[in-house]
Amino acid sequence: MKVCYNATRQSDLFNLSAIMKKISMSFGPVPTRVWRGLTILSILLCGWPSTPVFSEQSNQQIEAVSDNSELPVYNPPKRISPRARVGGELRGTEGSDPELVALVPDHVALTIRETPVLNWFLSKQTSHPVHFTLVDSRSIKPVYEAPISSPKEPGVQQIHLKNLGLTLEPDVQYRWYVSIIRNPESPSQDIVAGGIIERCEFSECITGMQPNLTCNGQSVLDNARHGFWYDAMACLCELIDANPSDVPLRRQRAAMLKQVGLHGVAEWDLRSIRTTSR
């Protein structure tokens, strides 16, 4: 789980934990549901960005690969908030427990869609329950929290908000999590990954940022260039799902992942190229 970067919030978290322990000693065991709520609260205390920072757009140029396809170049929004990604990098796939990685930058990333697709990576199959949580930044109580179908195989996964009946309001930040519940009685053992998403108000974005609302190779390049991470990545994953052996598409996704520090998943994509080409 992500380490708190705000000393005051970290102190608050320890106080909350101490209070829960005192309640348990005085009145008996605290229900697991309450502990899990405390776990989500601790992530919120650690994770909601408080001080926006500003970054220059990337000067990196679109490169060409041997098949003459272009690599997408992700230009983050000029006004970004750091420390938005929960969970770390992919360390390897040899451990006994699965690893989760949210395929997002470590800042609040944008979408143009009311019902975007969220992408995440699972290192290996799991028999444990998998939960999805969506939290509005204006409230601690989750907008949505429920089990989702466990993936049938490892690799890149999708969560379609439309299928869950969820829509995002414009100019509101939402934190989302995928959790593997290793022990229902001990939420501290959950494996958690996630990020923050914000929907750009359509009329504002259509004039200032030029989103591409289609899904093809050009829209991946356009949306990455204009800062719409979620739309570029979701389309790229959809194209790869339709044609898993497409080498240029895998290279494009690996390039995007490397640009936001997700080198482990990028290398997994590149290894998949070698596997499918045999």
Image (cartoon, grey):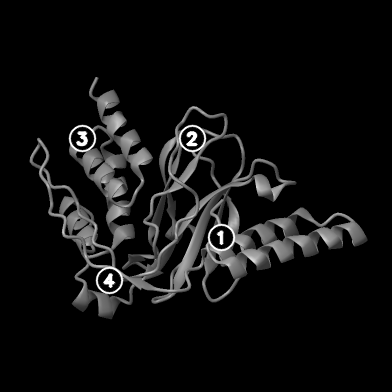
Quarter occupied by the C terminus: top left
The residue at the far top in this view is 278
Which circle's residue, 3 or 1, is located before the other in the chain? 1
Residue visible at 21% across and 72% down?
209
Q: Which mark, residue 78?
A: 4
Question: Local crowd at mark 3 within 10 Å, few (<14), some, or many (≥20)?
Answer: some
Identify which amino acid the numbered label 4 is placed on: Lys
Question: Local crowd at mark 4 within 10 Å, few (<14), some, or many (≥20)?
Answer: few
Would you identify the image quadrant in which residue 110 lies? bottom left
Q: Which mark, residue 30?
A: none
The residue at the far left in this view is 68
What residue sits right under mark 3 in the picture? 247
Observer-side mark, 4 or 2, equals 4
Q: Position of residue 99 (x, y in %)?
A: 50, 39
- Side (left or right) of 64 relative to 94: left
Q: Position of residue 80 (x, y in %)?
A: 35, 69
